[in-house]
Amino acid sequence: MNYRHGYHAGNFADVVKHLALVRVLLHLRRKETPFAVIDSHAGRGLYALDDAAARATGEAEAGIARLADLAGPEPLMTYLALVREAGENRYPGSPLLAAKLLRPQDRLIAIEKHPEEAAALKAALAPFRNAAIEQADGYQRLTKLLPPPARRGVILIDPPFEAADEFARLARALAGAIRRFATGIYLVWYPVKTRAAADGFCGEVLAAGPQRLLRLEIAVPAPEGKLSRAGLLVVNPPYGFEPDMRAALALAVPRLDGEATLDWLAGPDA
């Protein structure tokens, strides 16, 4: 498996993941106290939807392009406005979306392992003085950065799934992060290639002991061999997150010809 960001920028999974990130950041902004954003597998920050990688998959055309004229609740409108700000045939990755929603007192740490991607990320985030870029292994750096000094924040873990044991590494990294920063909000992306593998991963995360764990999955039609389903685990979703996401997805997902499900693995409705 390889879901490196450039090949899939702006696809159905990005829409859901980035909408969730924007919703969390809008929540964190409601208090004056500072917060931190840690993006463990940040990618390059800004993607050209007309380059060779994006054209090879065409996934943005079946994703973000279908939402251009959509209207809805604040998280959805904020997300779409940030996409438009990136420019024609451009799509902002998670670190750029986060950077644009930071206030002067907030901080972003974006980690990217691949040298070329890290260099592009540095250029994309150059205008943002409170954004730091690290070229490093996101898994190794994660626990060392936790808890953040602000003691408030969101951690996005969105690996490219290049390794055969990625689910196991991801589960271990998340368990270690939760031990160090149990009150943090975590957004954890994963592909659903087989139901058994995805459910096994969710079970490992649940065993780490989060008190509130929400699972969000989206499925869309796709040619055989292409990713058609992806999920997002949300540890400690903020107040109102679930109903707000349901409302936004009720508008967005039909445009993607997809179906979305949200269920509590631990917490209110588990």
Image (cartoon, helix red, strand yellow):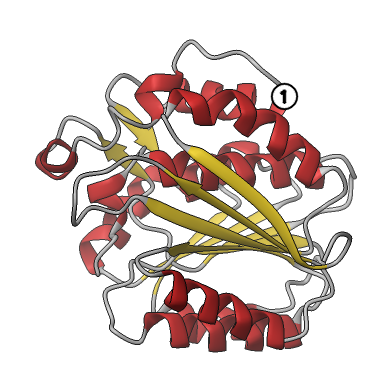
Residue that appears at 85% across and 42% down: 240
Residue 223 falls left or right of residue 241: left
Q: In the figure, 243 relative to 109: above or below?
A: above
Residue that appears at 33% across and 71% down: 161
Residue 268 falls left or right of residue 187: right
Residue 14 falls left or right of residue 77: left
Quadrant including the C terminus: bottom right
Q: In the figure, 103 relative to 262: above or below?
A: above
Q: In the figure, 95 relative to 71: above or below?
A: below
Q: Nearer the viewer, residue 35 or 69?
A: 69
- What is the x, y in percent for residue 172? 55, 89
10 Å crowding of disc 1: few (<14), some (14-19), many (20+): some
Picture quadrant of residue 124: top left
- What is the x, y in percent for residue 74? 72, 24
- What is the x, y in percent for residue 162? 26, 74
Label 1: element kind: helix
Q: Nearer the viewer, residue 75 or 222?
A: 222
Residue 89 falls left or right of residue 126: left
Residue that appears at 69% across and 80% down: 206
Residue 128 visible (yes or no):
no
Residue type indicated by callout 1: Glu
- What is the x, y in percent for residue 200? 52, 81
**Which residue position holds label 1?**
74
Q: Nearer the viewer, residue 213 or 159?
A: 213
